[in-house]
Image (spheres, grey):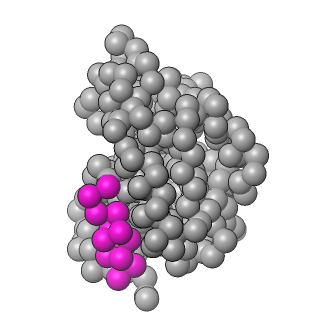
Amino acid sequence: MKSYLPVLNNISRELRNGRSIYDGYIRGWGIQFGDLREQVRKDPLYKQALALSSGRTVVSEDNRINIFLILRFFLDQIGGGDIIEFGSYRGGNAIFMAHIVGELYPGTRVYALDTFSGMPATNPKIDAHQQGDFGGVDLNELRRFSAANGLYNLEFVEGLFEDTAQSVLKRAQNIALAHIDCDIYSSVAYSYEVVKAHMTGGGYIVFDDATVSSCLGATEVVESILIRRDGLNSEQIFPQFVFRSGLNQARP
């Protein structure tokens, strides 16, 4: 299918401060002010992936569309790599991503990490969520559903991130997209710290909840660790925070 991304002739394609201003505008402006929502909703691949994930995801439509655009039009520009999701709940977004990359990038794997029994202990000084939120998932049913739909590139990894992430990252390819969707400060901070050394050059680090009113812990991680400590600049702030890993050289 021919690309339906907007063309912004007034925006430079040079990299600036570790991000592609042009790419960020295409997706963010295109969703918020252009017609990308409508274009994506008509995309057959998007519709297939959405149907598979129906009833299993709480990711907002705009965030899901943004992830779809990254996978559909941008991931092949950075040389490939696997995908990891920190916080999968009922697995809907992982299923969504696994179907897309299975069609576009054979061999790419999606690792979906969660306790699948609810959030660990939270910090009431910064987190609105409480221990046990987003629990009650039937992991065996989720795995059966995934297998029945041919998603053999998708692996659900049960347990605390601190107990599972490092072993997953050791056997994964470099990570092309890290979707951090775990809401609370400690989990978001750990997810970023553990994955950053495994990102492919130009890889996408996507924070699902850092702009959500009930997730100021996630916001604080972005502010204090990525922006202030690591000096990163976001490629998108709408519909979600998107950062790029190691994108420091201007394009030829």
Taking depth in this image into account, of 50 and 76 the one nearest to the observer is 50
Q: Main secondary structure of the magenta part?
A: helix
Residue under the image location 23 percent in, 62 percent down? 33
**Residue pushed farthest right?**
170
Residue 191: x %, y % from top left? 56, 35
Side (left or right) of 173 relative to 138: right
Residue under the image location 45 percent in, 48 percent down? 139
In the picture, which quadrant includes the C terminus? bottom right
Residue under the image location 25 percent in, 31 percent down? 213
Query: How many marks are shown on the rendered structure?
Result: 0
Residue under the image location 41 percent in, 29 percent down? 119
Q: Is residue 178 visible?
A: no
Taking depth in this image into account, of 30 and 48 the one nearest to the observer is 48
Side (left or right) of 72 relative to 248: left
Q: Is residue 140 above or below residue 227?
A: below
The stretch drawn in magenta includes residue 104: no
Q: Quadrant of residue 48?
A: bottom left
Residue 220: x %, y % from top left? 43, 24
Q: Is residue 132 visible?
A: yes
The stretch drawn in magenta includes residue 52: yes
Q: Quadrant of residue 208?
A: top left
Residue 49: x %, y % from top left? 38, 71
Residue 111: x %, y % from top left? 58, 53
Q: Is residue 158 above or below residue 39?
A: above
**Residue pushed farthest bottom?**
1
Taking depth in this image into account, of 83 and 217 the one nearest to the observer is 83
In the picture, which quadrant includes the N terminus? bottom left
- Where does the magenta region start and end? 44-56
